[in-house]
């Protein structure tokens, strides 16, 4: 069986969550099931990103030739299934191409919660930019136009999801908790085409709890440095309160990730608030950091899954996250393998974090539970779900 994955960006296991999970799933489908996996994308990545081998990889720019180029690719490589990783606005074009063949299928996957496009930009991010003195006039204009932009994006998003559902043979959500939300947002009468498949773990190993003593008193963030979605400023505000408390003088905050737009502003916040124990590591392989850290912080406004949460769990790094998206409860059982904080409740976040930081026995207990629970998302199980989905297309 020949599977073609479409992603906006060129695939790399060191890019974002969508690109990373697509890379790992494709490699497993090939190694375990002998499937031939192909990749098309719109935006190339710099050479610094690690690339994985596909049968054929091709860039297809968006434009009037998209369908013709895609048709030639499908025909030349005898593609059986296109897996559209998130571009619901392209589902109709893909359907037009596949309808020119017999027995070929389209699967569209939503990697975020429904309606995510409405979050760009947010009031929070615009105010943050204005406080930092970034393009004040430009951000004032965006602020005035924000209600109109959100209304337009909401309408276009609803249209794209509805059309994507109609044009696809199956629609994959990362959690069944998104089903009702997707049905309402896409204005659907039924959800018969929807299936739920979680994201698989990124790594093949689990932390050995017999080595827990090597864990440092370290809080960890692994994230794109982005304010609209990731809200790193909230994490820095939380840490600024924690660092003031002398009982936590031996703790540090490490931030792994890159983001050209906001990185300077975050570093300015650290400097202006005289924070002494914050380290910006840039884009790095996160495994060594998971290996040594004790607590993982997430402050996202939205996620489809939160791949870094399960990455942290499999390395015994206890996660804390705001209850800002529906699939979070698939990953974290509050008080057992992590903490779920009411969205935007910074004080509760600080209180739970402080309690966990000063209680090593609790951290160790929750680390064990985190590792155990993360095994639910092992690659073998998730790939088996994908194989079952492929087989269901013939029924």
Image (cartoon, helix red, strand yellow):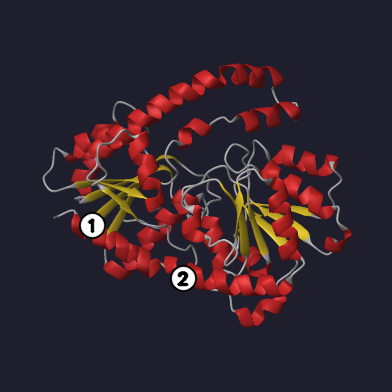
Whether residue 321 sits left or right of residue 137 in the image: it is left
Label annotation for residue 10: none
From where the camera sits, is residue 59 visible?
Answer: no
The residue lying at 36 percent from left, 68 percent from top is 381
Mark 2 or mark 1, whichever is nearer to me: 2
Quadrant showing the N terminus: bottom left
Residue annotated with mark 1: 390
Mark 2 Cα within 10 Å, few/some/many (few <14, many 20+)? some
In the rendered image, residue 394, in percent from the top left (x then y), is placed at: 14, 55
- Observer-nearest of 203 and 329: 329
Where does the image place residue 292, in percent across and percent down from the top left?
Answer: 68, 69
Front one among 253 and 100: 253
**Secondary-structure class at tag 2:** helix
Distance CA(mark 2)–CA(mark 1) = 23 Å
User: Does 144 sit left or right of 35 as displayed?
Assistant: right
Q: Residue at point 47% right, 54% down?
A: 20
Q: Name the quadrant containing residue 94.
A: top left
CB within 8 Å, label 2 to label 1: no
Write down the quadrant of residue 84 in the picture.
top left
Tell me the residue that label 2 is attached to. 375
């Amino acid at each position: 069986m020949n599977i073609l994955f479409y992603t906006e960006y060129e695939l790399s296991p060191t890019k974002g969550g969508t690109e990373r999970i697509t890379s790992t799933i494709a490699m497993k489908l090939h190694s375990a099931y002998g499937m031939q996996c192909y990749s098309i994308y719109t935006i190339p990545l710099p050479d610094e990103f690690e690339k994985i081998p596909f049968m054929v990889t091709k860039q297809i720019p968006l434009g009037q030739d998209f369908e013709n180029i895609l048709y030639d690719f499908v025909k030349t490589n005898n593609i059986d299934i296109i897996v559209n990783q998130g571009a619901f606005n392209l589902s109709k074009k893909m359907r037009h191409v596949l309808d020119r063949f017999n027995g070929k299928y389209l699967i569209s996957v939503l990697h975020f919660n429904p309606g995510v496009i409405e979050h760009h930009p947010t009031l929070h991010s615009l105010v943050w930019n204005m406080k930092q003195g970034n393009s004040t006039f430009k951000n004032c204009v965006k602020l005035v136009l924000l209600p109109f932009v959100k209304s337009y994006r909401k309408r276009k998003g609803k249209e794209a999801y509805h059309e994507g559902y109609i044009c696809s043979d199956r629609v994959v959500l990362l959690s069944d908790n998104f089903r009702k939300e997707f049905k309402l947002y896409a204005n659907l009468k039924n959800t018969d085409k929807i299936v739920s498949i979680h994201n698989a773990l990124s790594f093949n190993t689990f932390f050995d709890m017999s080595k827990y003593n090597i864990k440092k008193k370290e809080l960890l963030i692994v994230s794109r440095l982005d304010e609209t979605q990731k809200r790193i400023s909230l994490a820095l505000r939380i840490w600024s309160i924690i660092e003031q408390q002398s009982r936590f003088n031996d703790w540090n905050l490490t931030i792994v990730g890159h983001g050209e737009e906001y990185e300077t502003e975050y570093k300015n916040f650290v400097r202006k608030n005289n924070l002494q124990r914050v380290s910006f590591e840039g884009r790095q392989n996160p495994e060594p950091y998971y290996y040594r850290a004790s607590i993982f912080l997430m402050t996202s406004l939205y996620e489809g899954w939160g791949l870094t949460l399960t990455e942290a769990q499999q390395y015994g790094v206890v996660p804390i996250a705001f209850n800002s998206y529906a699939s979070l409860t698939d990953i974290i059982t509050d008080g057992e393998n992590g903490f779920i904080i009411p969205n935007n409740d910074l004080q509760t976040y600080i209180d739970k974090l402080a309690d966990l930081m000063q209680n090593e026995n609790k951290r160790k207990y929750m680390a064990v539970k985190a590792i155990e629970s993360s095994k639910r998302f092992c690659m073998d199980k998730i790939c088996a779900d994908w194989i079952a989905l492929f087989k269901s297309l013939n029924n």
